[in-house]
Amino acid sequence: MSFHQSLGSGIVAAEGGGFHAPGPGSFELPPVFELGGFGVTKPMLLLVLSAVLILGFTIAASRNAQLVPGRLQFAGEAVYGFVRNNLARDNIGSEHYMKFVPYLFSLFLFILVNNYYGIFPLLQFPSFSRIGFVIPLAIISWLVYVGTGVWKHGPLGYLKHATMPSGVGGPILLLLVPLEFFSNILVRPVTLTLRLFGNMFAGHLLLILFATGGAALLTSGNLLYGGVGILSFALGIGVSFLEMLVMFLQAYVFTLLSSMYIGEALADEH
Amino acid sequence: MDASPTKGKAVEGSINMIGLGLSAIGPGVGIGLIFAAFISGVARQPEAQSRLQSIAILGFVLAEALFIITVALAFVLPI
């Protein structure tokens, strides 16, 4: 039973004792197996699987590359072209963008695959609904854009670039510099983390609620409750389609914001 | 089991969820305004769509962040 639960999606039907509304506890899965006293949970395995999937896809799409692309090569080139042209080149500028395309491309695919686990049958757990997996991604993005700014402007130059808006002088700077430092250096990684985590968490919680609530209403034995249960399942299907949109959008937005921050760190004084 | 298990009981739950619902109003209005402006901008000048799209998504994301932070706080803070 516990093995089954640890592989489940947190969608555990109400057993006796009435219906328990799903909460943050639904995301705390017990470890699948122990490895030297270190519990390995389902989201960890999913992360490894995503790396294997992405490597397999990109290698399969790029080997035997033809001038006239086949289906797989076309799909790979479409994703790559989307990240390179619409995200990297438009936001970073045509001079330096190629240096950042590998990072942004892997970031985009990694978040996309891990988000779509949330509606993929049998897996059904978006890895990024656990905040511990999102924080390192935001830290890496933070290091990349701060590092880029330091590389371009020097440590003090970047600090000035990030905190002092051009064309402002005098005592107002006393107010502006701490505010800009707070918003540009400290808050950005926090909002990057919370946005991805919050969307995946809230979306998956909604799916759990509609699925378990629908099951509990259908099995309640009351005919009218059963009708509402069917409505709940229908709404759950609707929310799944909304989630498909949100999952893509969050991967897009995380990559877009990362590239915008890099572009801003690279910008010349104006 | 009783036919109506909640009969005679007080309503239970976290007051945080009321705050969560209230905090959805502001970003909801804001996101509506952002996409209304985006649609009318594209209707006036269809060739500017790709330029406007990333700006609209950026505004949407920034407006949504307020609500997402509340989602996190609603579950983290004690009742």
Image (tube, coloured by chain):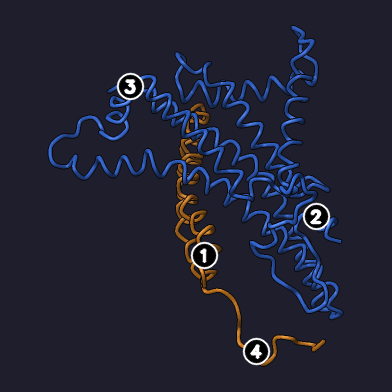
Give the residue at mark 2: A8
Give the residue at mark 3: A154
The residues bearing labels 3 and 4 have C-alpha atoms spaced at a distance of 65 Å
Q: Residues within 10 Å of mark 2 (few under 14, many from 20)?
A: some
Which is more foreground, mark 2 or mark 1? Answer: 2
| Residue A230: percent from left, percent from top | 81, 67
The kind of residue on which mark 4 rests is Lys
Give the residue at mark 1: B20
The kind of residue on which mark 2 rests is Gly
**3 and 4 marks in contact (CB < 8 Å):** no
Q: Secondary structure at mark 4?
A: loop
Q: Are marks 2 and 3 on the same chain?
A: yes
The residues bearing labels 4 and 1 have C-alpha atoms spaced at a distance of 24 Å
Q: Residues within 10 Å of mark 3 (few under 14, many from 20)?
A: some
Give above or below for A18 relative to B29: below
Query: Label 3 lies in what chain?
Result: A
Q: Secondary structure at mark 1?
A: helix
Shown colour of chain B: orange
Check residue B9 in the rendering and tell me which mark sits there, or answer none.
Answer: 4
Query: Label 4 lies in what chain?
Result: B
Give above or below for A13 relative to A162: below
The residues bearing labels 4 and 2 have C-alpha atoms spaced at a distance of 33 Å
Which is more foreground, mark 3 or mark 1? Answer: 3
The kind of residue on which mark 3 rests is Gly
Which is more foreground, mark 3 or mark 4? Answer: 3
Q: Foreground residue, B77 or B28?
A: B77
Check residue B29 in the rendering and tell me which mark sits there, or answer none.
Answer: none
The kind of residue on which mark 1 rests is Leu
| Residue A264: percent from left, percent from top | 39, 28
| Residue A66: percent from left, percent from top | 77, 8
Give above or below for A139 relative to A15: above
